[in-house]
Image (tube, rainbow, N blue to C red):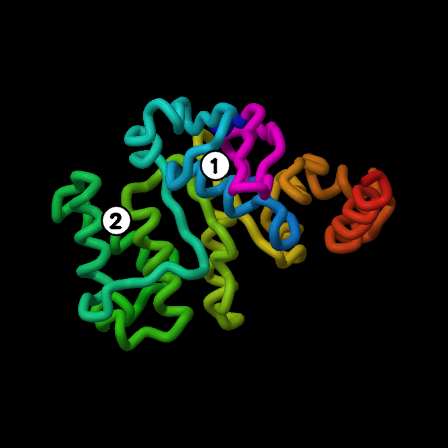
Amino acid sequence: MLDIQELRKTYGTFTALRGVNLHARGGEVFGLLGPNGAGKTTLLRIMATLLRPDSGQVTLAGHDALRDPESVRRVVGVVNGGMGLPARLTGREVLRSFAALYDLTRAQADARIAELDERLELGRTLDTRAGEYSTGMKQKVVIARAVIHDPAVLILDEAASGLDIFARRTLLDFVQATRAPGRLTVYSTHVMSEAEELCDRVAILHEGALVTTGSVPDILERTGERNLERAFFSLLRGEAAHA
């Protein structure tokens, strides 16, 4: 579902990605971890065809992100912590408009909205104008918008940022439910407990390079730590010692 080979990206004199190689299978929730400046957002933007790398290859769900970005966009949904909504539209209007972009009929769109209402507890967001939303209400509609076309690959970049405890739990439960054959969710977060709960495997980036990839139990065993946060710091200290 995801194959990244020797991905490199620079901004002037700053190197954001240093020959990153990553592979993820269908049926996984795959975590992407790292401190600020590690290259996570650059990597996710390249995957989403929002940014071109200097070199390397990216394939998602069988489509080449560099040679065939339009096909990738039809099978990918993207959510980050800072996405907005048109203030004058209701949630239902937002979702119907995005469904139309993916050639869903009105009946198909309304059936999908009903399904997402049940899974994300959209409730009154559907018939309330977005300008009146709380942060949690807005993020639920942003997530529903990203998956209205039932994408094979879902990219979540700090999607839980700013959510209250109830909206956050709805999001985490939704991510758990995305795990299915032929589907991949890439989950980027600074909150290690979220990654520990959700992710089948995680990749840790530091200063644009891949530090390690593996299941959480595997990483805990290798580092001798009792939780992912301690393992994360142990691995980064090891990187610093070898720098």
Position in image of residue 165 (x %, y %)? 53, 71
Q: Which residue sits at x=54%, y=38%?
A: 10
Report the quarter where the C terminus lies.
top right
Residue 17 lies within the magenta run: yes
Residue extending furthest toward the front: 13
- Please give the name of the residue rendered at 44% of the width and 54% of the height, measured from the top-left corner: 80
Residue in the foreground of this view, choosing between 118 and 172 = 172
Q: Quadrant of residue 60?
A: top left
Q: Between residue 35 and residue 131, name the one nearer to us.
A: 35
Per the image, is 71 magenta? no
Q: Determine the residue positioned at 76% across, 40% down.
A: 219
User: In the picture, residue 126 is in which quadrant?
Assistant: bottom left
* Precedes in sequence: disc 2 or disc 1: 2
Q: Position of residue 118 (x, y in %)?
A: 34, 58
The disc labelled 2 sits on which kind of residue? Answer: Arg
Work out which residue is located at the far left of the displayed protein and give it. 106
Q: Is residue 55 above or below residue 9?
A: above
The amino acid type found where label 1 is placed reads Leu
Residue 95 - label: none
Measure the C-alpha gap from mark 2 to mark 1: 19 Å
Q: Position of residue 121 (x, y in %)?
A: 36, 63
Q: Report the disc number at residue 112.
A: 2
The answer to whether residue 26 is visible is yes
Q: Which residue is mark 1?
A: 184
Q: Which residues are magenta?
A: 5-29
Give the prevailing secondary structure in the magenta stretch.
strand
Q: Secondary structure at mark 1?
A: strand
Q: Name the residue at 50% across, 69% down.
A: 162
Rendered view: 74 above or below 240? above
For label 1, the crowd category at 10 Å Cα-Cα, with few meaning under 14, some 14 to 19 and many 20 or more, is many
